[in-house]
Amino acid sequence: MLDLKVPKAAEIHGHLGLLPALLAQWPTFHAYLSSFLTILVVWVNHHTIFSHIRRSDHRFLYINGFLLLLVTFVPFATSLLAEHIRDLASSRVAAAIYAGTFFLLALDFNLLWSYASHENRLLDPAARREVVDSITRQYRFGPPLYLLAFVLAFVSVPASTGLCMALAVFFSLIGLFIRRAAGE
């Protein structure tokens, strides 16, 4: 959000006008919206898995803290992509950083969940096995597909970013399926 700039009246007076000045910032608007929606999906999925976790330990807190580090990096990676999307050479590097961020997020989400759910280490004793297994199965898709998005960044930036967006939609929907399976 901090990258969006309010066009100054003095700068647009006599020029094209306010609307074109705002439209010229479309990559920044897109980056903000993409970043926000991605963080929202992470937050919802984080909440979903934590509804099955009842305890924590020292190691678990560090795994969760690393997830926070990665989530706070998302706006930078998204802004970087928005800034360099129009230049072929730098857009590939920016898309790789963008997809790589989500690859690391997916790895950490899997680590967080597998650590908590291993032998029900940190889970609510009432957590249903089919729900736990469903979360485990669904999260396995993330790392290989985000790795594919990372590799695609060097071949096709639209394919890479499109796959990242499709995965965000996928992971936004899994929370609904998990909650339905859990009877919530």
Image: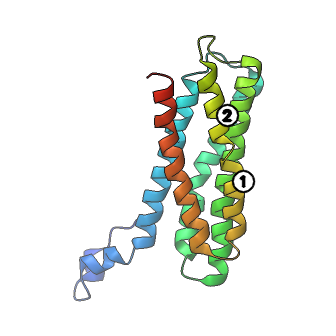
Mark 1 is on which residue type?
Answer: Pro
Q: Residue 25 carries which label?
A: none
Residue annotated with mark 1: 144
Depth check: give the residue in front, 23 or 174.
174
Name which residue lies at 46% across and 51% down: 36
Mark 2 is on which residue type?
Answer: Thr
* Residue 132 percent across, percent down from the top left: 63, 26
**Residue 8 appears in the picture as rendered:** yes
* Residue 171 percent across, percent down from the top left: 54, 45
- In the figure, 126 relative to 42: above or below? above
Name which residue lies at 66% across and 48% down: 142
Quarter where residue 61 is shown: top right
151 lies left or right of 181 = right
Depth check: give the residue in front, 4 or 166.
166
* Residue 145 percent across, percent down from the top left: 67, 56
129 lies left or right of 42 = right
Residue annotated with mark 2: 136
